[in-house]
Amino acid sequence: MPRTILHLDLDAFFCSVEETRNPELRGKAFAVGGRPEERGVVASCSYAARRNGVRSAMPMSQALRLNPGLIIVSGHHRAYSDVSKQVMQRLHDLTALVEQISIDEAFLDISDIQDDSQRIARGLQTRIRDELHLPCSIGIASNKLVAKIATEVGKALALKRIKADGRTEPPNAVTVVPSGEEAAFLNPLPADMLWGVGPKTSKRLAELGIHTIGDIARWREEDLIRLFGENGRELSRHAKGIDARPVVTERETKSISQEITFSRDVRDDKMLEKTVREQSAEVARQLRKNELAGSTIKLKIRWPDFTTLTRQKTLNHRTDQEDEITKAALELLRSVRKSNQLVRLIGVGVSGLGAPIRQLGLWDVDNEKSRKLQEAVDVLREKYGDNVIQKNT
């Protein structure tokens, strides 16, 4: 039996949340992101700003040149996370088969729901709009690959119509690809819309005279494998609209990390060590919150010339304790960086995750007291903010 997969994408999510926080932003050209004088980039931009050429991931200074009157809004990431959870709860109200793939995207498998898929999609779209005041677009197909591309195509077509009418509003598109028509739907689309086609692959395909997904589908699978290795097999299958991957309801966490890109390169040793301590504390808190511990502590560092290094230390046990993570991260920092050396980015992460090991022995009372104290501090910081308790270093 063919499956029915929905792909939901919240339209200009950060901007949509900001409009609910400040309705005066509606209809205006604005961008969420960092200040241009601090090398900020556009995290999200309104559809009015997009009409002037502003795009996500663009340097904010460039966005201002394209749109001199652009309003810049600082991000409120905790609010985005809270709203995302509310959206995902509404998806779970519909089906347990939900795979969240980012803060503003998810797949749903509604194969077992006995109702018209487009009616289900419209109902979901209406509920999210009425209850959370957020626009979203939805793609419907027999698999994840085609459903996601359907969302992208539907949004592009809707925005083209909206622009032609002189309006600036979200697409709110619902696009259906009937079962059996996957290949025909994909056939005229650009090759780089296909999963697995990045810049290098796209360039190589163009050199071979392959410009559309249909062009890929017409090549023999054996030839694509010869040219692109195992990726060629996936290219061949995907170009024909074949994708058997299930909706994955739980995703294993591989690592937990924190990093920051400084607005100006930093050479001050104490400031960098303070940053590493704060990042280690936050990583440890996230580990405990998710009931995880890790054995490998990683330090990521980037110099002003964009050279990026990663160093790691593996312990003989898993930890979720701030002190242990901080100690290892500082050792890595001192091993890779000379005093006063300029730093553009720094980050701390923990991998090798698993459940915390709780083996309280006769001589482990102090460790358990330390753990309980740390848990109490977590509760206080969650309620009153990170600065409620400061540790002397």
Image (cartoon, rainbow, N blue to C red):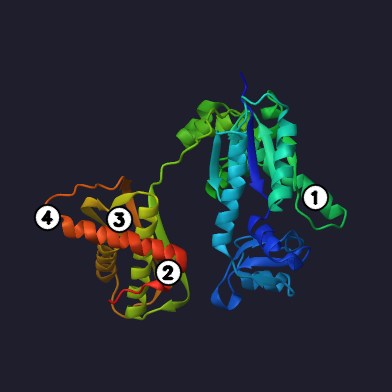
Dot 2 surroundings within 10 Å: few (below 14), some, or many (20 or more)?
some
Spatial CA span between label 2 and label 1: 46 Å
Quadrant the N terminus occupies: top right
Residue 164 on image: x %, y % = 86, 53
In front: label 4 or label 2: 4
Answer with mark 2 or mark 1, whichever residue precedes in sequence: 1
**Which residue is located at x 60 percent, y 30 percent?**
143
Please tell me whether mark 1 sits on a helix, a strand or a loop. Answer: helix
Q: CA distance from mark 1 to mark 3?
A: 50 Å
Up/down of 213 relative to 340, above or below? above
Q: Amino acid at mark 4?
A: Trp
Residue 150, placed above or below residue 160: above
Q: Which residue is mark 4?
A: 363
Identify residue for label 3. 320
Mark 1 surroundings within 10 Å by alpha-carbon count, few (fewer than 14), some (14 through 19), many (20 or more): few
For mark 2, what is the residue?
386
Mark 4 or 3: in front is 4
Q: Does residue 80 appear to the left or right of 381 in the view shown?
A: right
x and y, in percent, of residue 98 in the image: 56, 37
Quadrant of the rendered structure where residue 277 is? bottom left
Image-quadrant location for residue 31:
bottom right
Q: Nearer the viewer, mark 2 or mark 3?
A: 2
Q: CA distance from mark 4 to mark 3?
A: 19 Å
Q: Which secondary structure, mark 2?
A: helix
Distance from disc 4 to disc 1, alpha carbons, whole Å, reads: 69 Å
Query: In the image, what residue type sits under mark 2?
Result: Asp
The disc label shown at residue 160, or none: 1
Q: Are marks 4 and 3 in contact (CB under 8 Å)?
A: no
At label 3, the amino acid type is Asp
Of the numbered discs 4 and 2, the one sitting upstream in the chain is 4
